[in-house]
C-alpha cells in the first residue's frame, strides 16, 4: 500500500506538492488519496474560463519560444495573418534563431531575439508589449513557460501535450482562471478537414447519439527518437525512458472530445490503460551502441511499452479508446472513429470514410455529404489553409482562427480545461499501466461547470473578419 501511495505521488506529479495538499493523503490508500485529492481541487473554481471572451485586441503581438522542427513554420504562418506583429523570438540554439530571423528581414516584423541562457524566455514574457506567447519547446517546459507567461499577463498558445503531470494540469487551470488569460493548447488535429466535417455533422445530428469514439497517435518515429539531430538534446527519446503509458494522447483525443462535447455537457469519469512491453527501443539502442559509444547510456533503460491502449468511460455512459505507438513500422494513423446510433465515420486508415447504416458511402456519396456538412470555417478559408499549409492546412486553420478570435474578442475553441484534460490522459494512463490496468478517476478540471458549459461555437457567425495576407 505504501509503495502504491509513493508511486501515485510520483506518477501524478504530486510528489513535489506542498504538505498542505499532500497531508490529506496521509493514511489513505492510493485510491482514497486520488479521490480526496481530486475532490479538494475540484472545490475551487476561481473563474470559469470556458466560453470566456477576453477584451478585443486590434493587434496581436506575439513572442515565440522554441524554433526547432515545429516553431519556424508557425512564425511563417503568422506572417500571413492580418493584425499579427512578431515582437520576440527565443531559442537556445543561435543558428535556429538566426534562420527564422533572417526570413523576417525586410518585413514589418522586427523581433527582439532571446535565448542566451535557459531562462532568457522569462525576459520575453516580462515585456509589456507582447499579448501572446507561443510555445513549441520540449514537453517538460510547456507548463512552466505557460504559467509564467500567464502570470505576466500574456495569453498562451502551447504545443501538445500542455502538461505531463496532474499537478501541472492544475497549475495551468489555476493560472488561467486567476489571470483570465487564455491557455490554448495547439491541438491542430481539431482543425483537420475531416475532423471539422465530422464535428459539423455531429452537431447536426448526423451520427444520432454518439456511443463510442476512437483516436490514436500511431506514427513511426523510432529512428527520429534516436537521431542526434532530429530533436534537441534527444529530449523526445528521454521522455520514453521511465514513463510508461500514452505520452502523446491529444492528437487522437482532441477531435473526438469536441465531437462528444466533453467538458461541455459530458465528462470523463474513469480510464484504464494497458501497455505492451518494449520490443524495439532497447534493441535499437543496443545496435547503435555497438558502433557508437554515444548511445551506451541509452542501453537497458526502462523504455515505454511500444503500444499503449487506453479506454475511457464518460458520465453519460459513452466510451473512448485512445492508442499510442511511435515505434512500430506501420502506416501513420489517428483512427478518428466516430460510432453513433445512426452513422459512423472513420478518418484513418485513408481514405476518410462515412457510413449511414452498415455500408461505407461511395466516393460520390462522400463528396455530396461533404458539400452538405462542411462547416463555415472550411468554406471561408479552406483554399488559403491548403495554400499556407501545415499538416495539409490544419495548422493554418488553427492559427488563423485563434488570431481571429483574439482580434474579435471571442472565446477560443480550446480552453485551459481542454488543455488540462486531454494532457492528463498521459499521467493517468501511466498510473493505470503501473497498477495492472486498474481504473483511475479522471479529474474534473471544470469543477462541475461541464454540466452547463456551451459546446465549441463552430458557426463563425461572429468574427471571421481577419484578412489573410
Ligand atoms: N502539433 C503538432 O503537429 C506537432 C508536431 C511536431 C511537434 N509538436 C510539438 O512541438 C514541440 C516542439 O517539438 P519539436 O519537434 O519542434 O522539437 P525540437 O527539439 O525540434 O525543438 C525544440 C526547440 O526548443 C528549444 N529549447 C529547448 N529549451 C529551451 C529553452 N530553455 N529556451 C528556449 N528554447 C529552448 C531547442 O533549442 C529546440 O530548438 C513539442 O511539444 C512537440 O510535441 C507538435
Image (cartoon, rainbow, N blue to C red):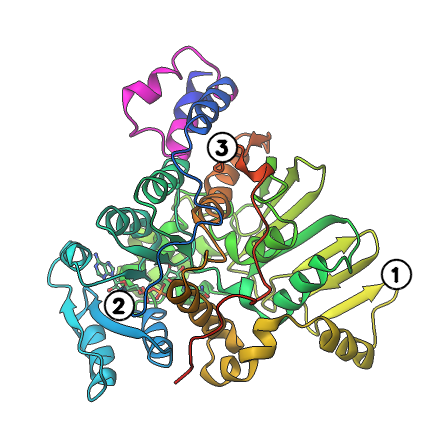
Tag 3 near tag 2, CB within 8 Å:
no
Circle 3 SS class: loop
Residue 234 on image: x %, y %: 31, 60
Give the x, y percent position of residue 392: 53, 77
Comparing 193 with 328, the one in front is 193
Asked whether mark 2 lies closer than 8 Å to ligand 1, one says no
Where is ligand 1, by quadrant?
bottom left
Residue placed under numbered mark 2 in the picture: 61
Proximity of marks 1 and 2: CB atoms separated by less than 8 Å = no
Residue at 39%, 24% in the rendered image: 6
Most extreme residue toward the right, as rendered?
358
* Disc on the earlier residue, 3 or 2: 2
Task: Please state the extent of the stretch shown in magenta in the rendering.
Answer: 8-31
Q: Residues within 10 Å of mark 3 (few under 14, many from 20)?
A: some
Q: Earlier in the sequence, mark 1 or mark 2?
A: 2
Q: Which mark is residue 447?
A: 3
Give left or right: position of 28 versus 80: right
Q: Residue at x 79, y 80 (%)?
A: 363
Q: Nearer the viewer, residue 329 or 289?
A: 329
Helix, strand or loop under label 1: loop
Badge 2 element: strand
**Residue 232, horizontal then vertical, whole percent:** 28, 63
Front disc: 1 or 2:
2
Badge count: 3
The dot on residue 357 is 1
Distance of label 3 from label 2 (alpha carbons): 32 Å
Label 3, label 1: how far apart the Cα atoms are: 38 Å
Question: Along the horizontal axis of the image, is 286 left or right of 431?
Answer: left
Up/down of 240 relative to 267, above or below: below
Q: Is residue 452 above or below residue 22?
A: below
Amino acid at each position: 500500500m505504501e509503495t502504491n501511495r509513493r508511486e501515485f505521488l510520483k506518477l501524478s506529479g504530486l510528489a513535489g506538492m506542498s504538505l498542505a495538499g499532500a497531508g490529506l493523503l496521509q493514511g489513505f490508500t492510493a485510491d482514497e488519496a486520488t479521490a480526496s485529492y481530486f475532490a479538494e481541487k475540484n472545490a475551487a473554481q476561481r473563474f470559469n474560463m470556458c466560453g470566456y471572451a477576453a477584451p478585443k485586441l486590434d493587434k496581436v503581438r506575439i513572442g515565440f519560444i522554441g524554433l526547432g522542427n515545429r516553431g519556424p513554420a508557425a512564425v511563417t504562418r503568422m506572417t500571413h495573418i492580418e493584425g499579427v506583429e512578431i515582437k520576440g523570438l527565443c531559442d537556445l540554439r543561435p543558428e535556429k534563431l538566426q534562420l527564422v530571423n533572417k526570413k523576417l528581414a525586410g518585413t514589418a516584423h522586427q523581433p527582439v531575439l532571446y535565448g542566451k541562457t535557459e531562462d532568457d524566455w522569462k525576459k520575453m514574457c516580462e515585456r509589456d508589449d507582447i499579448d501572446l506567447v507561443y510555445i513549441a519547446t520540449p514537453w517538460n517546459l510547456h507548463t512552466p513557460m505557460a504559467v509564467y507567461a500567464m502570470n505576466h499577463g500574456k495569453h498562451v498558445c502551447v504545443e501538445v501535450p500542455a502538461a505531463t503531470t496532474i499537478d501541472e494540469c492544475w497549475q495551468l487551470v489555476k493560472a488561467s482562471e486567476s489571470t483570465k488569460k487564455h491557455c490554448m493548447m495547439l491541438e491542430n488535429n481539431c482543425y483537420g478537414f475531416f475532423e471539422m466535417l465530422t464535428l459539423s455533422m455531429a452537431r447536426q445530428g448526423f451520427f444520432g447519439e454518439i456511443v463510442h469514439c476512437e483516436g490514436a497517435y500511431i506514427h513511426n518515429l523510432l529512428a527520429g527518437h534516436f537521431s542526434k539531430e532530429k530533436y534537441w538534446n534527444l529530449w523526445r527519446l528521454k521522455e520514453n525512458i521511465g514513463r510508461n503509458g500514452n505520452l502523446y494522447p491529444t492528437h487522437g483525443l482532441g477531435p473526438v472530445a469536441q465531437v462528444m462535447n466533453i467538458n461541455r455537457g459530458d465528462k470523463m469519469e474513469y480510464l484504464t490503460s494497458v501497455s505492451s512491453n518494449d520490443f524495439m527501443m532497447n534493441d535499437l539502442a543496443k545496435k547503435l551502441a555497438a558502433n557508437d559509444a554515444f548511445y551506451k547510456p541509452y542501453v537497458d533503460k526502462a523504455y515505454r511499452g511500444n503500444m499503449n491502449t487506453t479506454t475511457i468511460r464518460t458520465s453519460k455512459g459513452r466510451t473512448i479508446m485512445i492508442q499510442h505507438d511511435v515505434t512500430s513500422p506501420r502506416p501513420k494513423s489517428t483512427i478518428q472513429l466516430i460510432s453513433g446510433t445512426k452513422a459512423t465515420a472513420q478518418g484513418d486508415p485513408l481514405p476518410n470514410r462515412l457510413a449511414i447504416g452498415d455500408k461505407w458511402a461511395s466516393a460520390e456519396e462522400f463528396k455530396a455529404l461533404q458539400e452538405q456538412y462542411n462547416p463555415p470555417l472550411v468554406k471561408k478559408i479552406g483554399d488559403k489553409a491548403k495554400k499556407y499549409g501545415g499538416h495539409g492546412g490544419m495548422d493554418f486553420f488553427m492559427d488563423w482562427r485563434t488570431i481571429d478570435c483574439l482580434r474579435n474578442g471571442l472565446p477560443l475553441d480550446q480552453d485551459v480545461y481542454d488543455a488540462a484534460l486531454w494532457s492528463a490522459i498521459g499521467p493517468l494512463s501511466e498510473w493505470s499501466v503501473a497498477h495492472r490496468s486498474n481504473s483511475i478517476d479522471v479529474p474534473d478540471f471544470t469543477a462541475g461547470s461541464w454540466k452547463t458549459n456551451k459546446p465549441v461555437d463552430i458557426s463563425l457567425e461572429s468574427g471571421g473578419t481577419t484578412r489573410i495576407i
